[in-house]
Amino acid sequence: MRLIGHLKNEASAKAFSGYLASTNVRNLIEADPEGWAVWIHSEDQIESGQQALAAYLQNPADMKYQLASQAAEAMERQSRREEAKAAKRLHDRDRIWARSGLAPLTLSLIGVTVAVSLAIGLNPTPYGVRWLTISNGGMEFLAEVRTGQIWRLITPIFIHYGPLHLLFNMLWLSDLGSMIEKRQGPVKLALLVVVLAIVSNLGQYWVDGPFFGGMSGVVYGLFGYIWLRGQCDPASSLTLSPTTVWMMLAWYFLCLFGFVGHVANSAHTVGLVVGVLWGAAPMARRFFRG
């Protein structure tokens, strides 16, 4: 989504937005310190949106804008009525999940993690998790992965050391994972989890060796992604309260400076950095495209 300009007041913004909608240009208007900002959703429609805005500014009184705005409002009212009727009739899977607070993929990840953690024990030995660690400790870097055991890049996230380690990671995963899945879909969440697991595990392995575990690298990556995406792309509806941000950052630094014992700090750091960069991608695209 990209900002193409500003209009002075809400009435003109709504009229222009309605006109864009009538020409199949998806857009968003919102108030900001400069007036009413006009955002275009698709990069492919930026140029046509800019041209339409220039034409509107030259002749905002043209009747076509008012007629288009009225038609768009009528369509929106009709759409809301139809959605309300459908909501009364249907009790489908999505509504059930929404009520439970957990999205399906997030719940599945929690289920697998808890099951694996309980199966191997919450105080596992290196031998007991030899098929899940990123490596078994040989001299060659990623020796087992190089022979085809690719799953080892991800499976350390299912190892946990103690009930509190497991509990807190699952609580954060349920909140952060469900938020992303409900707003951006299970495919986006799956991609985030896989990439964050791989990079955070590699970072921890590089710094501290192969014997570690936990979902916290992924959790910090999801936190960083939501935090920055919500700042850079308000239309994403990804938001964190200031209290949540401060809690996550405070815990990060407590772990980093050794107040919590032996913790996979490198996994936390790599996950957080990658999540922040991923979340800031919309701002980077706007910057480089002018």
Image (cartoon, helix red, strand yellow):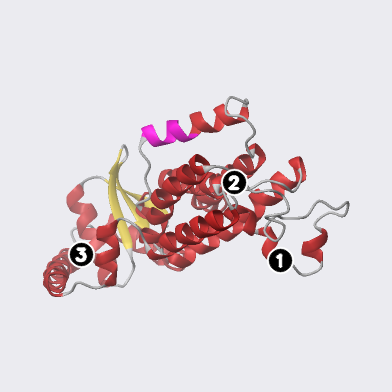
Please indicate whether residue 99 sits to the left or right of residue 172 in the image.
left
Along the line of sight, the residue nearer the viewer: 184 or 280: 184
Which of the two discs, 3 and 1, labels the residue nearer the N terminus?
3
Quarter placement of the N terminus? bottom left
* x and y, in percent, of residue 220 in the image: 53, 44
The residue that label 2 is drawn on is: 271
Q: Is residue 103 covered in magenta?
A: no
The residue that label 3 is drawn on is: 65
Q: Which residue is drawn at 20% across and 59% down?
A: 15
Q: What residue type is labelled 3?
A: Tyr
**Is residue 232 in view from this perspective?**
no
Q: How far apart are labels 3 and 1 at the CA level?
A: 57 Å
Q: Which of marks 1 and 2 is in front?
A: 1
| Image quadrant in which you'd find residue 92 | bottom left
From which residue to which does the magenta span run?
A: 242-248
The residue that label 1 is drawn on is: 150
